[in-house]
Image: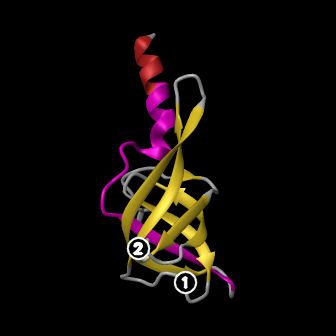
Amino acid sequence: MDKTDERRTEQRLRYYWPIWFAENFDETLAQGQMVDVSSRGAAFTCYANDGCPYPGQNITARFSVPHYGPDDSFDMENFTRSAHVCRVENVNSFLRRIAVQFADPLPFNPGEQDAAESYALTQEA
């Protein structure tokens, strides 16, 4: 099925890892679960309670992203990013899916690591 309304310019990395967030890091941090990430934004789920972000809110998030090496090994790189909440969707009565855009992009494209490495390997042969 063709998706003509796809607006993403970068492939996202789908993975499930904790993410910690708050409007201000001086506050108590809430925990969510990362769903996917790109260099410019992320989506995560969190409990539908008072600590859940709302559309238009600015939050600070702390999370880790796998960064793959040439030998298929990876390290988890830690990031703290200010982010703008673009969208909030109800998953069910207990969970919400939050989409955020980072104020500063990550230094690599998490979902395109394998493609870039494969391309580099074919160019060397």
Other residues around mark 2 within 10 Å, as few (<14) / some (14–19) / many (≥20) = some
Q: Position of residue 38 (x, y in %)?
A: 44, 53
Other residues around mark 1 within 10 Å, as few (<14) / some (14–19) / many (≥20) = some
Task: Judge from the rendering whether residue 46 lies leftward or rightward of residue 25; answer left or right.
Answer: right
Dot label at residue 59: 2
Q: In this view of the protein, which residue sits in the foreground, 15 or 21?
A: 21
Instruction: Reply above or below: 70 against 44.
Output: above
Q: For residue 107: magenta?
A: yes
What is the secondary structure assignment of the residue under circle 1?
loop
What is the secondary structure assignment of the residue under circle 2?
strand
Q: Quadrant of the C terminus?
A: top left
Instruction: Reply above or below: 109 against 18.
Output: above
**Residue 124 occupies which quadrant of the picture?**
top left
**Residue at the image position 52 percent from the left and 24 percent from the top:** 70
Q: Quadrant of the N terminus?
A: bottom right
Q: Name which residue type carries label 2.
A: Ile
Q: For residue 78: magenta?
A: no
Dot label at residue 100: none
Q: Position of residue 44 (x, y in %)?
A: 55, 67
Which stretch is magenta? 94-118
The residue carrying mark 1 is 51
**Visible residue check, residue 94:** yes
Q: In this view of the protein, which residue sits in the foreground, 72 or 32?
A: 32
**Visible residue check, residue 2:** no
**Residue at the image position 47 percent from the left and 19 percent from the top:** 121
Q: Name which residue type carries label 1.
A: Gly
Q: Position of residue 15 (x, y in %)?
A: 61, 53
**Residue at the image position 53 percent from the left and 77 percent from the top:** 28
Instruction: Reply above or below: 102 against 65.
Output: below
